[in-house]
Image (cartoon, rainbow, N blue to C red):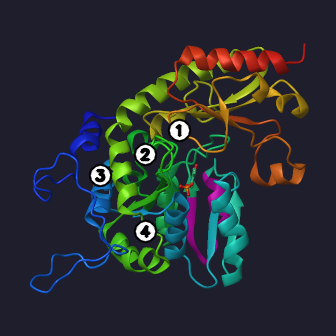
């Protein structure tokens, strides 16, 4: 992360002149804007709202894009972006281990419009070369994926896709705009769930898409304006507030996670740890080239059978059990436990996989908690 990013989080896009010098931009809780004597540049808050635009300006600056659009959820941003690049009879390439609701939209929902999707592992450029067809219109990525933390070479894939007239879109929720900037590598559109680190306090649901000014201008009226899943001004104010502390929160998440990952990797009751920040990550060269940091989410496989792994929560005091991540609180969930073999193979998730979101508690308390849980379930 650069100092410049830190300064964007504090002041970027706040536009004090527009808001009478207010250090915190006001919440424009107004659905419409009148124009009897003058057109003030706003019409209706489904299309544009000054409070929402503050968060959008900050996120565009952070991702090094020309413009951003805020949505009512990460999934709203993802589905709007995918629909923008989809058309009747088109083909999309995505990852086996991509965020599950995004995969289900592509795999189960879009076929009703004649749109087909091919799933690939995504670690090798050959995966994409083999999957791309004449009618492929979009390569939809997530790097690293938020379960097994494998990466895609974003620059190489963007180049391949561009040479064939195919658009590329990346879910950058894991790294945040502080640790990875896909637009700089030639990717066309970046999406985030703002419900994770960007908001950071587990008190909002939101999403954002960042790309060229032309893309955002089209989508503002088409996929966002028509489908209508726009962020509301109260949520935008919470998001802007969250962004101001993003650099300090991420530094602490990352420092805690680095300690926790090392601790798990050397724990006798742990089979394997999945974390981009570990030196022995299978794609460590790409991690160094493409990312400037790793956040607080990781996974591991305990040396225990599934029935024992299910006992883990009983021994935990710091961790809560829940599927989300990116907030102040440490969370655990079980993506590789209790599923049939076909489901695991289809999504590339190994049996026994446990995922943790390392929160902002003390690293010592987090490790003590994990140690207590692992000792309880370990085969002895
Ligand atoms: C949570 C999440 C989303 C979806 O975001 P919502 O705000 O919950 O709709 C998308 N991608 C990833 C990687 C996520 O973790």
Element assignment for label 2: loop
* Residue drawn at x 69%, y 57% as measured from the top left: 120
Mark nearer the N terminus (3 vs 1): 3
**Alpha carbon of mark 3 to alpha carbon of mark 2: how far?**
11 Å
Name the disc covering residue 230, or none: 4
Label 1 neighbour load within 10 Å: few <14, some 14-19, many 20+: some
For disc 3, the marked residue is: 58
Q: Nearer the viewer, mark 1 or mark 2?
A: 2
Name the disc covering residue 198, or none: 2
For disc 1, the marked residue is: 286
**Alpha carbon of mark 4 to alpha carbon of mark 1: how far?**
35 Å
Q: Is residue 183 left or right of residue 281?
A: left
**Which residues are the magenta region?**
125-140
Mark nearer the N terminus (4 vs 1): 4
Q: Position of residue 322 (x, y in %)?
A: 67, 41
Mark nearer the N terminus (1 vs 2): 2
Mark nearer the N terminus (3 vs 2): 3
* Residue drawn at x 15%, y 49% as measured from the top left: 22
Q: Position of residue 114 (x, y in %)?
A: 68, 83
Q: Is residue 226 left or right of residue 20?
A: right
Q: Position of residue 187 (x, y in %)?
A: 44, 58
């Amino acid at each position: 992360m650069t100092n410049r990013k830190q300064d964007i989080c504090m002041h970027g896009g706040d536009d004090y002149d527009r808001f009478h010098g207010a250090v915190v931009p006001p919440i424009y809780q107004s659905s419409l804007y009148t124009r009897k004597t003058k057109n003030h540049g706003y019409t209706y808050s489904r299309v544009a709202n000054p409070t929402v635009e503050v968060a959008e300006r900050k996120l565009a600056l952070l991702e090094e894009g020309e413009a951003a659009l805020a949505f009512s959820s990460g999934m709203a941003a993802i589905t709007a972006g995918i629909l923008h690049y989809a058309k009747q009879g088109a083909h999309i390439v995505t990852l086996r281990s991509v965020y599950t609701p995004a995969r289900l939209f592509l795999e189960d929902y879009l076929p009703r419009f004649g749109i087909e999707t091919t799933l690939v592992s995504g670690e090798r450029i050959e995966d994409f070369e083999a999957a791309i067809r004449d009618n492929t219109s979009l390569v939809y990525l997530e790097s690293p994926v938020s379960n097994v933390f494998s990466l895609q070479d974003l620059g190489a894939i963007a180049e391949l896709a561009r040479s064939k007239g195919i658009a590329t879109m990346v879910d950058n929720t894991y790294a945040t705009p502080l640790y990875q900037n896909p637009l700089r590598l030639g990717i066309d559109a970046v999406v985030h769930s703002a419900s994770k680190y960007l908001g950071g306090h587990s008190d909002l649901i939101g999403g954002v898409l960042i790309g060229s000014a032309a893309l955002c201008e089209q989508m503002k009226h088409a996929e966002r304006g028509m489908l209508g899943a726009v962020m509301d001004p109260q949520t935008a104010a919470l998001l802007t507030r969250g962004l101001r502390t993003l650099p300090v929160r991420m530094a602490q998440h990352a420092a805690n996670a680095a300690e926790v990952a090392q601790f798990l990797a050397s724990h006798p009751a742990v089979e394997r740890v999945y974390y981009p920040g570990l030196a022995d990550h299978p794609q460590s060269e790409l991690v160094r080239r493409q990312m400037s940091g790793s956040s607080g989410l990781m996974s591991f496989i305990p040396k225990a059978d599934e029935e024992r792994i299910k006992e883990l929560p009983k021994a935990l005091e710091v961790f809560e059990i829940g599927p989300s991540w990116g907030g102040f609180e440490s969370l655990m969930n079980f993506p590789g436990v209790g599923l049939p073999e076909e489901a695991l193979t289809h999504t590339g998730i190994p049996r026994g996989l446990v995922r943790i979101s390392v929160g902002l508690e003390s690293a010592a308390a987090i490790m003590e908690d994990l140690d207590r849980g692992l000792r309880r379930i370990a085969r002895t």
